[in-house]
Amino acid sequence: MPAAKKRTTAHSPARQIERIQTGVRLEKRLLKVLKGLAESLDLSLGDLLEGIALHALENKPPFSAATLKKITDLKRIYELDLSAADSHQLRE
């Protein structure tokens, strides 16, 4: 996978960090939606997940209205019918 472009804003300089490789298991359709979203935003999947997690840890919404529209479209395309209410209730 090609490296994602590093995004910085005018008010926050790039921060030096250390990343580690991890193996996580995700629901198949959810992963497809996340990969599609990352692609549409020109981000790596890791960068997208980091952004979502950092926003969640500060109780801030991670997505704009336009991005939420993309997510709705991707959920329809990949037939993802899970919601936050299903969290921690999924079984294989």
Image (tube, helix red, strand yellow):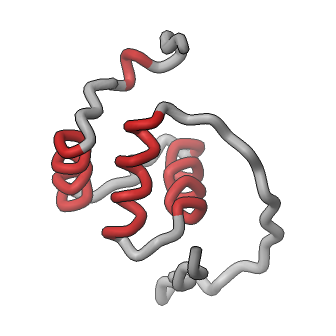
Front in this rendered view, residue 83 or 79: 79
Which x, y percent locates residue 72?
Answer: 19, 45
Instruction: Quadrant for residue 21, please give it.
Output: bottom right
Q: Is residue 31 above or below residue 8?
A: above
Which x, y percent locates residue 22?
Answer: 76, 50
Q: Is residue 89 above or below residue 69?
A: above
Q: Residue at x 39, y 47 (%)?
A: 32
Quarter of the image where the N terminus is located: bottom right
Instruction: Quadrant for residue 25, please give it.
Output: top right
Classify residue 34 as left or right of residue 26: left
Which x, y percent locates residue 29?
Answer: 38, 37
Q: Residue at x 73, y 45 (%)?
A: 23
Which x, y percent locates residue 69?
Answer: 17, 53
Q: Is residue 25 above or below residue 1?
A: above
Q: Is residue 32 above or below residue 51?
A: above
Classify residue 24 as left or right of residue 62: right
